[in-house]
Image (cartoon, rainbow, N blue to C red):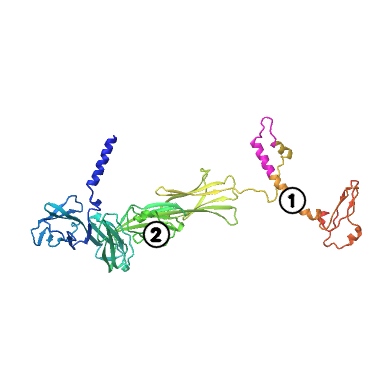
Amino acid sequence: MSSYSLLFSLVCICECFIFPASAQRVNAWSDVIMVETGSAVTLCCSEEPVVTPRLVTWMMMGDKGTNWTSLFSVIREGGNKRLQNAGRILEISDQIFLRFTATEESGGLYSCLLEKEDKKFKERIILLAVIKLTLAPASVIPIDSTARLKAEVSPSYAVAGGTWLSRTGSPLLTDVSLAGTLLTKLPRVTHSDNGIYTCNITVDGQSRKPVYSYTLRVKLYGKKVAWFPNITYAGPLYSLAALSRSAVTLPCPNINGDYVLLYWWRPDSPSSSPELIFQFDRWRDSKKQSNLRLSLLNRPSVLSGNFSFLLRPEMKDAGRYQCEVFRDDQVFAQVTALTVLYGYSKIRSYSSSMDLICMYSERSLVASVKWSHVQRPERQLPSSAVMGQTIITIDLPITPDTAGDYTCTLQLNNGQTIRYLYTATMPRTEPPCCSSEQPHDLTTQTAVSLLQPTERNSTPEPSILLPALSLLLFLVPVVAVAVGVLLWRRGPCTFPQNMERTLSHYSGEVENIYETPEDVRQSTPQNAVYMDLKLTGETDVYRELDRYDQCCG
């Protein structure tokens, strides 16, 4: 099996080297000459004086040919000669020339073979490329039409690359997808497009002149304006529904066009005049738009001429859209009717109820609009309808019976359905700030007992342990805050400034901090605090009296 594969590979390689295709003969010629159709051609057999040959042979291989065709085969017998055959002239003097007028079929390889004494001593191969320049749709272009500038080269493998230049010398988008053809277009031409345009072509292989330049003059007809009476529609009216601000695609005809125009009719106004809201020229890479929520979809497809639009519509963007794609002198169109749905909630003023409102525009294609409760679909929701709106009312506050998801469903005549969803939730019930409510039945002993393991299992049940832990975690910071507030409020009473109290633990008797208590009582109360320490019992516990701080009484 491997020997057959090896044999097949060798055959393929030999075939590629022994029988090269015309486009692969990169090094098969010594020079490239490019001329326009209808111009005179002179091919020289040798650029240097040659030894007088005995036999001169000119041969040609056409654009798609694989064999050489003999044009002249002359035995030179001294003196100059001039021979003619099929419109071609052979001149033999100090040099050997082949002269003729170029046609579209003249392009190809030309071989001049010189022989002496039955031996070939010189051969020269020349690649002749014939270029044809055309301007369409006419020599004088109507305003607003698409001017087409095209250069066609035969044979096609003579072209290595090229581009068209504008009248100011800037490069234009050039289509080279067809071998040997360089095409550019000027859509919707105006008088500013008048001028001379240049096509630069780089030839393939060895050549004394690697780049050839040719020009075309574009002239506009001052009064004639292009008219496109026939529009080919890609299909029937396309109905589409979308939620407000969601992404929606507006299709265009599936053809490769030169430029695109998008027209818009206002919603629910079929007799209104259309507005041109978007235009794009792919050849000049220029656009103009009035709706900033519109954009072209898929940049690579746009560059090849396949257009579509991405829209994030608001309510006012509903209506009818007509996408017109222009290719040369043909117009293709697609019409789309867009319905936009928008839902919101509104609490009535001085009322204990809330309205759920479902609005929609471009109503002509709408089959039905209705509200429903997702969790209780069997429930009938009373609704009121006005032009372009469907409203239901929910009592406030939300109860377990009215809570849940409410859906507004819009269905078009073609069966397409879109939905707006609103979720009604009950208000959260939270305790007042900085206060707590302890459970009546749960005491410290019961809370501790919940944390202790049972006899059957050393690990408490999660269903009992978790509530107890949650309660303790809640009580600890609350109690800490309460104690901190109490200490802060009683701070001036418990720790009076400019005073110092001591209890004698040596004798078990009370030491009066004043030497003369009566003097202290008669002193100014500003910035001073005094205490009367009076015996309250046999336990030698003293009561503190502050006549200025009433909170300590």
| Camera-side residue of 453 and 446 | 453
For label 1, the residue is: 484
The residue type indicated by label 2 comes to Trp
From the viewer's perspective, tell me whether residue 531 is left or right of residue 279. Answer: right
Residue 153 makes an appearance in the image = yes
| Camera-side residue of 394 and 184 | 184
- The question of residue 536 being in magenta is answered with no
Q: Among all residues in the image, which is located at the extreme bottom?
A: 222
In the picture, which quadrant includes the C terminus?
Answer: bottom right
Boundaries of the magenta span: 451-473
In the picture, which quadrant includes the N terminus?
Answer: top left
Q: Position of residue 155 (x, y in %)?
A: 22, 55
Counting the numbered discs, the total is 2
- Report which quarter residue 517 is drawn in: bottom right
The crowding category of the residue bearing disc 2, from other C-alpha atoms within 10 Å (few below 14, some 14 to 19, many at least 20), is: many
- Report which quarter residue 455 is drawn in: top right
**In what element is the residue under mark 2?**
strand
- The question of residue 466 being in magenta is answered with yes
Q: Position of residue 355 (x, y in %)?
A: 54, 53
Which residue is painted at 23% across and 51% down in the image? Answer: 22
**In what element is the residue under mark 1?**
helix
Dot 1 or dot 2, earlier in sequence: 2
The residue type indicated by label 1 comes to Gly
For label 2, the residue is: 265
